[in-house]
Amino acid sequence: MKTAVEELSPTRVKLTVEVPFEELGESMQAAYKKVAQQVRVPGFRPGKVPARIIEQRFGRAVVLEETLNDAVPKLYGQAVDESDIFPVSQPEIEVTKIEDGEQVEFTAEVDIRPNFEVPDYQGLEVTVPVAEVTDEDIDTQLNALRQRFATLTGVERPAASGDFVVMDLAAAIDGVNIEEQQANDVSYEVGAGSVLQGLDDALAGMSAGDVKEFTTNLVGGENAGEEAVVTITIKSVKEKVLPELDDEFAQLASEFDTLDELKESLRGQIRRNKVIDQVVQARENALDALLDKIDIPLPESALKVEIDSRKHNLEHQIAESGLSKEAFFRLYQTTEEEREAEIEKSSAKALKTGFVLDKIVKAEELGVSEQELTNFVVRRAMQMNVAPNVLAQHLADNDQLTLAMVEIVRDKAKTVIGDAAKVVDEAGNEVDLKALYTEINGEEAAEEPAAEEKAAE
């Protein structure tokens, strides 16, 4: 087999492959067997029709077509391997010459990973947040705990921001009630930021027994986006009462007997989270610094696939929310145009990142052990709240284990880049990542950093 590579652009090539006919022998035998199974010839059992009878009855062209259907994909894969290119799209294949008994020629146009060099990433200067634990950090955590153990007490006064109300809601368009837009005994925190525009403003100052109407656009259901008059009926107003911050609270909210013990435990947890964040930020920032030093043309087809995939996920997310597009984007304080622009930008970065990390994986000869793959599946199963064996079977059944291994080795490459960086915190102090690995994982695991694993857990 002879292969010629023509560069059509930095991200697309055309392979011209010439194959001597004798190299098609295995595929031709398979073609005869396949045709013999499909045809019916009097006097012969299915699958037992001789090759000469097939050619006499149905023609040589039928066999050649089946031969090429079997051989060309394999030959294309062989040509790719021999040409040292990295396809990122499905090839456009055309058989351009068939000389029966002599040779076959076909072309394949395909988008490829661009050819580029990864610059030296030793000593990239990156900055990470400070890992010092402040009294304010502890107070924030304590307040979050108090919020979890807060109680609601009924009050005889108008509702204010932070209060909880129990209410009935009813919506009407042109005086006709919309059945699916009726809801009773809805509990809501005033000021929480409802997707139903105008609700918080309407609730402010209402007391139990009050009824009020306001006009807004509906955010879900068949009438999403239409203007409606919403009627609020307040049944009760309750204020949130936080528990006193004392030893009794520590016993209620934790396994500790005193508030001081609880604070000390929180200090350790906050320190650990901040250290993990330093490691993760060091890797991400070092990767960003490296990406800034590389200019890569991106294959249009691969970029389109990435963008379309992310847009599809966004559409699915909107559909699952039950909200109109306008309400969904308002909930996340953005617009459809801003989200689409962000998708295009993040898709381009993701594609470029994959190309760079794959280069480092190859240069550093990074691989995946069976234990690493098992750990990955267990962590991902925990995140998805499914059994690890169920997820493992799903990955195997859907040919996704290779994708999982790609994700693992790319994370390893990101670690290589981070470990090579010169890291300082925002106060100007040098950060020793190896010392942080020891702090996170313990002495025995210091040489096998797993900060992201710990963060996932």
Image: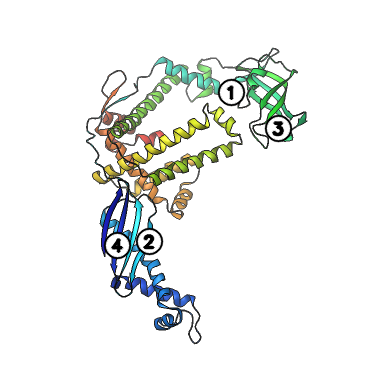
The residue most toward the top is 157
Whether tag 4 and tag 2 are in contact, CB under 8 A, the answer is: no
Which residue is disc 4 drawn over? Answer: 17
Local SS, label 4:
strand
Local SS, label 1:
loop
- Which residue is pictured at 43% across the width and 36% down the height? 344
Local SS, label 2:
strand
Which residue is disc 2 drawn over? Answer: 94
The residue most toward the bottom is 43
Mark 3 or mark 2, whichever is nearer to me = 2
- The correct choice, above or below, for 413 with respect to 432 in the image is below
Mark 1 or mark 4, whichever is nearer to me = 4
Whether tag 1 and tag 3 are in contact, CB under 8 A, the answer is: no
Q: Position of residue 429 (x, y in %)?
A: 27, 20
Disc 4 residue type? Val
Nearer-the-camera pick, 136 or 94: 94
As drawn, the label of residue 193 is 1
Local SS, label 3:
helix
As drawn, the label of residue 181 is 3
Disc 1 residue type? Gly
User: Counting residues from the N terminus, which is met first, the one under dot 1 or under dot 3?
Assistant: 3
How busy is the neighbourhood of tag 1: few (under 14 within 10 Å), some, or many (20 plus)?
few
User: Counting residues from the N terminus, which is met first, the one under dot 2 or under dot 1?
Assistant: 2
Mark 2 or mark 1, whichever is nearer to me = 2
Disc 3 residue type? Gln
User: Counting residues from the N terminus, which is met first, the one under dot 4 or under dot 2?
Assistant: 4
